[in-house]
Image (cartoon, rainbow, N blue to C red):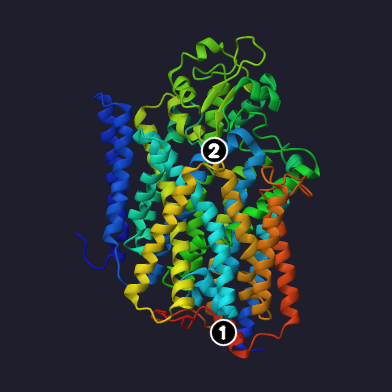
Amino acid sequence: MFKGKFIDNLPKIYGLYTGGFLVFIILMAIAEQAGMTAKTIGILFVAFTVCIYAIIGYLSRTVQVDAYYVAGRQVPTVFNGMATAADWMSGASFVAMAGGIYFGGYTYMAFLIGWTGGYVLVSSLLAPYLRKFGCYTVPDFIGTRYGGNLARFCAVVVLTLASFTYVTAQINATGTIASRALGIPFELGVWVGLVSILLCSMLGGMRAVTWTQVAQYIVLIIAYLIPIFWMSNKNGMGFFPHFMLGEEVARLGELEAQFGLVKNAAADIKAAGVPGGLKSIALPHSGVPEGAMGAWKFISLVICMMVGTASLPHILMRYFTTPSVKAARKSVAWSLFFIALLYTSAPMLATLSKLQLMDPTLATGIIGKPIADVMQIEWVNSWINVKQAFIADFNGDGVLQLNEWFMRGDVVVLATPEVAGLPYVISGLVAAGGMAAAMSTADGLILAIANALSHDIYYKIIDPKADVRKRLLVARSLLIVIGAAGAYIASMRITSILGAVAWAFDFAMSGLFFPLILGVWWKRATKQGAIAGMIAGLASGTAYLIYVYPKFMGNAPWLGIDHLRFGIIGASVCLVVMVVVSLMTPEPDSATQKMIDEVRIPSGKTILGKQH
Amino acid sequence: MSNKEKHWEKTKGLMIITLAIWFFFGYVVFMFGSSLNTASFLGYPLAYYMCAQGSIIAFVVLIFWFANRQEKIDEEFGFTEREGDD
């Protein structure tokens, strides 16, 4: 059945896999009709998919350096696109994005633009050139282009800070989903999540992560799209929701006017005892805030997310795995295509689920109905019991108003199938999808950190004579240590999912964006300039974060640049310092200049050898 | 000007055009969000639509277009990769 090389058989293998997964969903649906309990279905969904990933991880084990670090540079464009999409779409994208749009409407959708537009920067400014360079890690490029261990070391520091901020949020998400689906406490769920993550990456490094990420993308996109199409069709809102929800968006505007968008006073929320992290709808769904400040807040967030995207090492390193420079460019396009499938669906999911709750003429509507009746609804009860939803009758009229219904953002995706009255098999599917999204991103991030530490710190700086066996042993040990550290911090529950995710982008852009692009696009950029830029960018960005973040110093943001946008400060400082210092120091030697010329053309040998 | 320099000039030109289109769909559109929203497309308010789908689709098309253009430039100057270059 499978003749020839593994790579040639990929379409067949993943085609079978997708078919198998669909059959599994149907079997679960039949089992549900036959009386299998919701809990068992949830466990089976998560356990089945995680086992598949573990098997792929085991089959992709390797003892070769280039397979471990860059998957042997033979991942075809479309598959690398899928793997990047899974790498990219985190627990936050899957679980929290629709919830963010649900509460924040248009203003939140700046994230959608930022998290997609960044790929234009990746394709035109970076990915093809980094691929031509032939590096194993992002600091590998900085270290070779600028020369010297200090530049390399600074890049590793920025990479570690940005990726680690991100990874705790992902492990947190796997923990939340594992604990819900398997019915275990969150603190245990985090460790179960970690073991699943490591099963995918430990034995095969980048090669194993690539092939599990493709599998995870397939699960997560199916899990995201099926409920949207089902809900839309079930309620007669449109056969193809993406192009047919215009009326529903307008209807939401009417309902907002009818119920009124009320922002609750913090004192009222506290007095009513609303659990932390729960919100009520207080912003319009499609309305645009008036004035220049509103537009600037939107645009500044877009800047941070776009530039951050182009600086995040776990994404950039995916393009090191393609067979050629040409393939790296195409692969960025496919990545964004696969990402767009989910991102253009998130607003539709938010619209559908919001309407189902808000429209009193629908059977599922709860706003505007007597609270006593709403409390009888099964899903309302079960989410209130786990403190993910809350009802506070502020005006004491016994009727549920829009500002009296509180929910956690994540619940929008996780509970929507139940709210819409879809069979439980869909909830199980959504849990498996969320798990896939969080696991795939966590894998990419942990691997990015461990690879930078093992390749750039251990091999390049500490022990350049280490043999392959020892290098891979160090790489794998670091993987476990970093994963465990992330899980430990996640189990302490420090920040909400989204705050932390946006910070990772800001950290990455503060320290890495300009050293990366100027390394290719400006020959005059010097080692001293890059080092000064990285240090000044990261330090100023971090200082500004401490200055504005409410839980630290809490000062008033300058020009609306709050803690989600501190990268604007960091990256600007980085650019100025890097340019000034570069111009003050002697220009790079002719060998470096020649190397940059070589990087700029696709043909010829990579700068760094196949194995280095 | 050497072949390499000409190739780089063209590559730079393409990069600037690409980023100009990117800037339009990523920023210019949203500078005028509140006035755009009075118009509608497929029944959606226009700014909302651009945010939910319009600009995202534009980015996908833009990157595919960019990749093809750049391949043509590489071909023109004879810098296309051959099998086994790596």
Which residue corresponds to mark 2? A98
Q: Which of A185 and A279 is in front in this view?
A: A185
Q: Which amino acid does label 1 sit on?
A: Met
Residue drawn at (60%, 70%) of the image = A516
Indicate the secondary structure of the residue bearing disc 1. Answer: helix
**Residue A164 locus on image (x, y percent):** 52, 55
Residue drawn at (44%, 63%) of the image = A450
Residue drawn at (61%, 33%) of the image = A103
Q: Which amino acid does label 2 sit on?
A: Ala
**Residue A492 locus on image (x, y percent):** 50, 43
Give the letter of the chain under mark 1.
A
Indicate the secondary structure of the residue bearing disc 2. Answer: helix
Picture quadrant where residue A7 is located? bottom left
First of labels 2, 1 by sequence position? 2
Which residue corresponds to mark 1? A595
Residue drawn at (62%, 75%) of the image = A519
